[in-house]
Amino acid sequence: MAIVIGAKPESGYDDPMGLMADCHRRIERFLETLRVVAQNASGRELSEEEARAVGTALIYFRDAAPRHTADEEDSLFPRMRAAASCDVISTLTQISELDADHRRAAMLHQSTDSMFNRWLQQRKLAPNESQQLQADLRTLCQIYKKHIAVEESIVFPLARRILNSSVQLAMGEEMKCRRGIRSGAEPAVRKQSSGEHASGQQKPATA
């Protein structure tokens, strides 16, 4: 992956909220790849480029994205609930809604993964299957748009304020463990190529 001069580097494990926001950018990018391909290739066989882009995105959502969900549900949200500050109490309903978003998104990802794999194997989807795939992807886009906005405008800033540095470092260590990274290691620098586009030819990132 080419390095873009002046691009924002990925966050380190000492900044778990920053890493989660980095994961959001990958989710947006890979989801847009799937949405664009499903729309543009409807009714026909996928090109080699489209098939590679779809395969990369599916691998990301199947293997890497669940780690991001665990980062939030197992490392972040429980610590915020335990903080019991007035600010957290006022956001508990939103945090519960974020949990529900994860469950809805997981079901839709199972459906879209199945339909894309059918498309790759059978070379073509029936019109009703193509319409359902596009509808599911639109719903996923809507879920993530709202979900990410709430987390990045409310939840993550609040977490940075109420969770001290030792707690955030502990979260970072848990995130490393989920990714099989030894203690003390940092994520490889990974930036978006200036030539990257919606059909996104790139290796799946570690969420």
Image (spheres, rainbow, N blue to C red):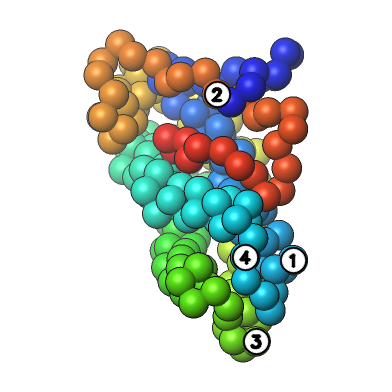
Q: What residue appears at the point 58 percent right and 78 percent down from the top-left corner?
A: 124
Q: Which residue is mark 2?
A: 190
Q: What type is the residue that disc 1 sits on?
A: Asn
Q: Which mark, residue 127?
A: 3
Q: Secondary structure at mark 4?
A: loop
Q: Tell me the quarter of the picture where residue 183 sits.
A: top left
Q: Nearer the viewer, mark 2 or mark 3?
A: 3
Q: Earlier in the sequence, mark 1 or mark 2?
A: 1
Q: Earlier in the sequence, mark 3 or mark 1?
A: 1
Q: What residue appears at the point 56 percent right and 32 percent down from the top-left corner?
A: 22
Q: What residue appears at the point 62 percent right and 71 percent down from the top-left corner?
A: 45
Image position, residue 200 (x, y; %) = 64, 44
Q: Which residue is mark 1?
A: 40
Q: Which residue is mark 4?
A: 46
Q: Nearer the viewer, residue 43 or 137?
A: 43
Real-space CA distance between mark 1 and mark 4, rounded to the nearest whole angstrom: 10 Å
Q: Earlier in the sequence, mark 2 or mark 3?
A: 3
Real-space CA distance between mark 1 and mark 2, rounded to the nearest whole angstrom: 28 Å
Real-space CA distance between mark 4 and mark 3, rounded to the nearest whole angstrom: 15 Å
Q: Earlier in the sequence, mark 4 or mark 3?
A: 4
Say if residue 174 shows up in the picture: no
Real-space CA distance between mark 3 and mark 1, rounded to the nearest whole angstrom: 13 Å
Q: Secondary structure at mark 2?
A: loop
